Image (spheres, grey):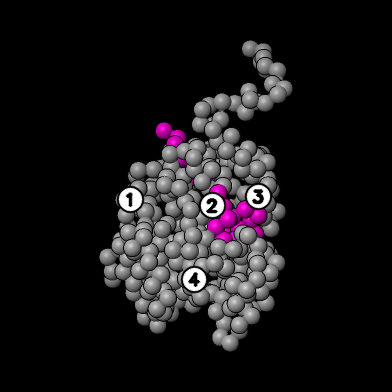
Amino acid sequence: MKNSVVFIVPTGIGAEIGGHAGDANPVAKLVASTCENFITHPNVVNASDINEMSHNTLYVEGSMLDRFLENKIGLEKVCGNKILFVVNAPIHKETINAISAARVTVGADIMVVTLKTPLKMTGRIENGIATGDVSGWQELVKQVKMYDFDALGIASEIKVGRDISLRYYREGGVNPWGGVEAIASKLIADALDKPVAHAPVEFSMVENDNELFMLPLNEIVDPRIAPEAISTCYLHCIIKGLHKAPQIGNDVTVDNVLCMVTPYNCMGRPHKACLQNKIPVIAVRENKTVLNDLMPDEFLIAENYLEATGMIMALKKGISFESVRRPIPDTIVMEG
């Protein structure tokens, strides 16, 4: 039964909706109402200390989602994961308090471990797209394999240039931390074959730089960035997501996917997998990005997410789009 919808907003490409700090949550809840399984990646619903994902959301790290669409793995729903949370030493009291708060509200089983080798991450913007460098991830993988856990949460600083950080807060644009987060998560998830999510703890803290540290607290920011401005440790979004993130299994397979919904002008690995597996792709024109990729003729084009939701319902019920529009095209009669 095709009862699942895949919803993506690729990280670090400046999507108008979902390219900032969890600002795709309302759209995700709307689209999730059309299906039994709403399959998405952390970037869509992560909003620092906020995560408003629906009860039917399958929170799937990007590389696992790619492999799922390529029919290399299936997904298994879980009641609750045992979460291992790794941080660079020394661990701060704010981080412990944030994890403790999540344990008593989410009800998650969480163990915290400090890394022997620091995970170092640097974010930057290249050709208008967020990217970066990661070191220490191999050592992280080796260390965590010593523990019994179902899902991995990571909290570490991401170094980003001061001017880039200030410009993002004051002018918006491409989130400079998201690209390197996606790189790190994919490397580690591929190595572990388990759910992984990263939170950029204290990414804005710069010693003796009160302007940068206090800016989100003292100035009114773009509403799409506001979740970062009101958050403390940025951890709760990933804890909520990892708590019930699916494992690799066979409950849900690519054969269950009704369609995938994507921003308009981007084309990557998940899109190509959908084309190969004849999964309809709905591209939403209103959600533009900094990319200028051409949309294949096979893609279905929606002007906005309200229209995309109607298209999903039509696909679900087997109703042709033409039959609910006017004028209805003439019936085509082919000579035998």
Marks 4 and 2, Cα distance to the nearest angstrom? 20 Å
Q: Is residue 5 magenta?
A: yes
Q: Majority secondary structure of the magenta segment? A: loop
Q: For numbered disc 4, what is the local secondary structure?
A: loop
Q: Is residue 205 above or below residue 323?
A: below
Q: Which mark is residue 287?
A: 3
Q: Earlier in the sequence, mark 1 or mark 2?
A: 2
Between marks 4 and 2 in the image, the one whose residue lies nearer the viewer: 4
> Left or right of 46: which side holds 168?
right
Q: Earlier in the sequence, mark 3 or mark 1?
A: 1
Between marks 1 and 2 in the image, the one whose residue lies nearer the viewer: 2
The mark tally for this picture is: 4
The range drawn in magenta is 1-26
Query: Which amino acid type is shown beneath numbered disc 2?
Result: Asn
The location of residue 292, given as percent across then percent down, is 70, 53
Q: For numbered disc 3, what is the local secondary structure?
A: loop
Q: Earlier in the sequence, mark 2 or mark 3?
A: 2
Residue at image mark 2: 25
Q: Earlier in the sequence, mark 4 or mark 2?
A: 2
Location of the C terminus (image quadrant): top right
The location of residue 280, given as percent across then percent down, is 56, 38
Residue at image mark 4: 232
Please give the name of the residue rendered at 44% of the width and 53% of the height, measured from the top-left corner.
59
Marks 1 and 4, Cα distance to the nearest angstrom? 29 Å
Please give the name of the residue rendered at 64% of the width and 80% of the height, measured from the top-left corner.
211
> Left or right of 297: which side holds 269?
left
Residue at image mark 1: 78
Q: Earlier in the sequence, mark 1 or mark 4?
A: 1
Regarding residue 63, the answer to whether it shows in the image is no
Q: Residues within 10 Å of mark 2 (few under 14, many from 20)?
A: many
